[in-house]
Amino acid sequence: MRSLVTGADGFVGQWLVRELLTHGDDVTGVTRGDHTRLTTLPVEMATQVRWASAELLEPETLRAAVKESKPDAVYHLAAQASVAASLRDPVGTVETNVIGTANVLEACRSDAPDALVVAVGSAEIYGAVEPGELPLRESAQLRPNNPYAGSKAAAEMLALQYAQTGWVRVIATRSFNHTGPGQNPSFAAAGFAKQCADIARDRQAPVLAHGNLSAQRDFLDVRDVVAAYRLLAARGSSGTVYNVCSGHAVSMREIVEELTRLAGRPIELRQDPGRMRPVDTPVVVGDPALLQSTTQWQPAIPLLRTLRDLYEYFLKEDG
């Protein structure tokens, strides 16, 4: 299969490229500029990728990448993925996530009309969840409560409209929290892991800054997530939304406790007001039943292994 991945040099993108290559796909990786930021994709795999430079807000560059690669499947990962950044720049977030998605869809409509687009979205769009709605199914009401979530909800609706109109075949995901080696420490679990690794290497005082540790979230390993994306491209139904989640919630405090245990040092926990969200949902957990019945996917990597691998990634990191 010929696959095109936007955001191929990002955290999830590199793991998806690895997954696709491992299963024999011919992969085109779309990045902004060159692809010198690779952290988890081995060099021997990177050389197997056809790299293309494109900008989400420059439609002609996307069309060129799609026209050249003639993909059977397009995995649209490129996005502004930070809630905090969306609060600082809501307009830029909407431009990247909504207009950027429209440009990807238009490129496919024009130059790869038979391709299937996997529009990777976020469970953030569920927003202010009521306890009685848990675990969240795809039919749950959407109440996005930050600009990032709003932009991803709009992007999903737009993508599904393309499918309903018959312009492009589209599968949309609502991906819950996922982490693993290579994640940016601006995200909670990775940030905790980096702090613990820095403390263990005497690069930081034994104080871990944190936000709301009582929040409970549904976490997956990034390697299980990209396996789900590949299976959805092969077996999913166009015009359908799929939760990508574990079905189990874990508190941020439990994650911190496991990471501090790995560090093997007494560590003081200190709340940082700057890490607190203006609006935070207490518990978010999804129902993966539709994904599982459609693809027979099951998560293979337990959270404790994910956290250990994440911690060891930062422990080995230079700088």
Image: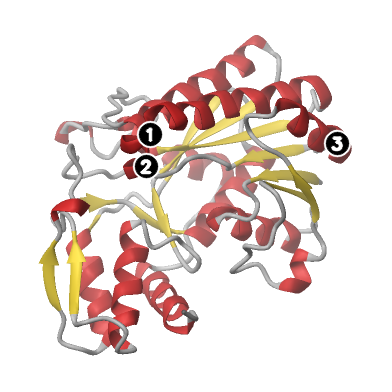
The amino acid type, in three-letter code, at marker 1 is Asp
Find the distance from the CA under tag 2 to the CA under tag 1. Answer: 6 Å
Q: Earlier in the sequence, mark 3 or mark 2?
A: 3
Tell me which corner region of the image, top left, top right, bottom left or bottom right, holds residue 73: top right
Task: Give the x, y percent position of residue 265.
Answer: 20, 89
Task: Give the x, y percent position of residue 22.
Answer: 73, 63
Give the image's coloring scheme: secondary structure
Disc 2 and disc 1 in contact, CB within 8 angstroms? yes
The amino acid type, in three-letter code, at marker 3 is Lys
Disc 3 and disc 1 in contact, CB within 8 angstroms? no
Task: Give the x, y percent position of residue 285.
Answer: 28, 45
Which residue is labeled 2 in the image? 85
Q: In this rendering, would 245 be left or right of 97? A: left
Find the distance from the CA under tag 3 to the CA under tag 1. Answer: 34 Å
Judge depth for marks 3 and 1 and give the one in front.
Answer: 1
Instruction: Label 1, secondary structure: give it.
Output: loop
Q: In this rendering, would 165 be left or right of 70? A: left
Identify the residue at horizontal 65%, vertical 51% (top origin): 8
Which residue is labeled 3 in the image? 70
The amino acid type, in three-letter code, at marker 2 is Ala
Instruction: Give 52 or 165, whichever is nearer the viewer.
Output: 52
Judge depth for marks 3 and 2 and give the one in front.
Answer: 2
Task: Reply above or below: 203 against 247.
Answer: below
Which residue is labeled 1 in the image? 89
Identify the residue at horizontal 66%, vertical 32% (top origin): 117
